[in-house]
Image (spheres, rainbow, N blue to C red):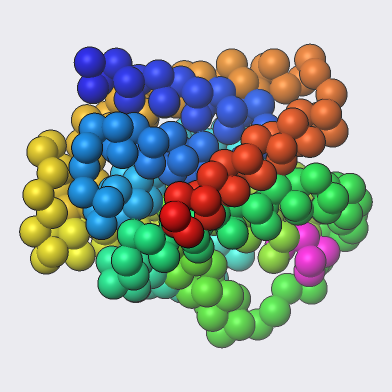
Amino acid sequence: MEILIFLIIGALAGFAAGLFGVGGGTIIVPLLFIVFTQMGYSPDNIMHLALGTSLATIIVTSISSLMAHNKKGAVMWPVFKNLAPGLAIGCFLGAGIAGQISGLYLQLIVGVFLLWVAYKMFFGGKKQVASHSNDVNPELPSKPKQLAAGGVIGVASAIFGIGGGSLTVPYLTRYGVVMQKAVGTSAACGLPIAIAGALGFMIFGMQQQVDVPNTIGFVHIYAFLGISIMSFFTAKVGAKVAHILSPQLLKKCFAILLTVVGFYFLYKGLL
């Protein structure tokens, strides 16, 4: 029964990721939070398990996304090389920081983050799409500054359980990188974030001796397998459906969904 639930979450997360053009983490974390709560896990561990497992599943989905974007030449590998060390180190440290934050505060932090993403999707979409066509030579910051930016994005990604696309794409478009290349490079950046974050949540979770079956630290193995397998396939279906429907309407619908989930986390955290 557990596996079936996780397969359904994977199907929904993958479909939504393909449909709305966002990382699956924004869907996976809330759904896992609800499922783990219903399974009667300790409230102290639920949010950490949702975040750690979400990052582990992003390893698989980011490889799929990275390969697709690379075929279209949309990955800026020199930029990826500058950002990747900071992303990996930041995300590993972020997992350690998240491990020290109580489950209650994590709920509030993730709730506020989801409301911010919802706001950006509802009101900020047009600005991002209208980024410069100056992709021949975008004026990016120096290597040390890119490394530092990677560190900040990495820490935030671990605490929010995401692949970093919500942060990496605006960072790159701000400096004149066209949307397609920003999204492609962000997809590549999701891999070091996911690997370092998942390892961090495993290691720091094992140190805290989490008493939950079928887990390694703060990563639930059955959830990881079920979600990864299904989301790999359904993301492609979601992407096809996205081309049939209005992108602006889709973004607004998803923003409303994130708003509801964000307020749900705040409500649960403040109870």
- Identify the image quadrant of the C terminus: bottom left
Asked if residue 161 lies left or right of residue 198, the reply is right
Expressed as whole percent of the image width and height from the top left, the position of residue 138 reads 80, 67
* Image point (22%, 37%), residue name: 40
Query: Toward the viewer: 97 or 129?
Result: 97
Asked if residue 155 lies left or right of residue 138, the reply is left
* Image point (13%, 54%), residue name: 210
* Image point (75%, 52%), residue name: 119
- Identify the image quadrant of the N terminus: top left
Query: Toward the viewer: 150 or 242?
Result: 242
Expressed as whole percent of the image width and height from the top left, the position of residue 183 reads 67, 47
The secondary structure making up most of the magenta span is: helix
Residue 58 occupies which quadrant of the picture?
Answer: top left
Residue 23 occupies which quadrant of the picture?
Answer: top right
Expressed as whole percent of the image width and height from the top left, the position of residue 176 reads 82, 64
Q: Is residue 24 above or below residue 230?
A: below
Q: Which residues are magenta?
A: 172-176
* Image point (70%, 48%), residue name: 118
Q: Is residue 11 magenta?
A: no
